Image: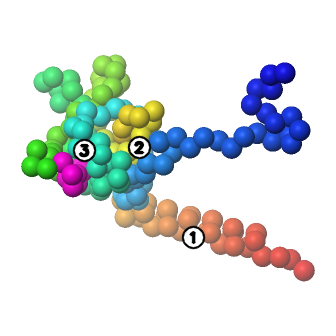
Amino acid sequence: MYTLGLDVQAGTRPMAKKTKDSMTPRIVNRAARHKFAILETIEVGIVLLGSEVKSIRHGQASLAEGYARVEPEDMGLYLYGVHVAPYSHAGPAGHPPLRRRQLLAHKREINRLLDQTTAKGTTLIPLAMYFKRGMVKVELGVAVGKQHHDKRQDIKTREADREIRRGMTRKVI
């Protein structure tokens, strides 16, 4: 009798198999959501060297100073300012840590991003870098810089939510 992976007697499913992607780190730009209001997100691929992939798999990358730009001359999408640490076992033929990296997206998506970023004050920033089915993906956000009062409002809202959660966990007698 075929049971589709269910243990009929115990009534439980077998444990989920850990994939290589679930064990690799997700590199997140935490400051981005504080400094910018994210209008839209998009997932794109990235062209990397072998030593860069190994370094990212070990979590040795920083998105803090990174930004993306659509170059109108070749209609290419590029990532600037992202630091990927040199891989220790790469030897002298390693990669430069701060280099321009090409991002992979459909032409219509690149055109849409170009239209959105031509407005004053909007930019493309990397929000996260992670592995998906063995490939490195970058989550880009179309962002507008926050003013100081916007940041204060976010802090007030976050503290109010925290107080509400604290109040909900206390027992009422």
From the image, state whether disc 1 or disc 2 is nearer to you: 2
Amino acid at circle 3: Glu
Amino acid at circle 2: Tyr
Please, which residue is most extreme toward the bottom here?
173
Element marked by disc 3: helix
Q: How many marks?
A: 3
Q: Is residue 138 above or below residue 5?
A: below
Q: Is residue 161 left or right of residue 88?
A: right
From the image, state whether disc 1 or disc 3 is nearer to you: 3
Report the span colored magenta. 82-90
10 Å neighbourhood of mark 2: few (<14), some, or many (≥20)? many
Closer to the camera in the image, 16 or 131: 16
Q: Earlier in the sequence, mark 1 or mark 3?
A: 3
* Residue to which mark 2 is pinned: 130
Closer to the camera in the image, 22 or 8: 8
Q: Which image quadrant is residue 16 in?
A: top right
Q: Earlier in the sequence, mark 1 or mark 2?
A: 2
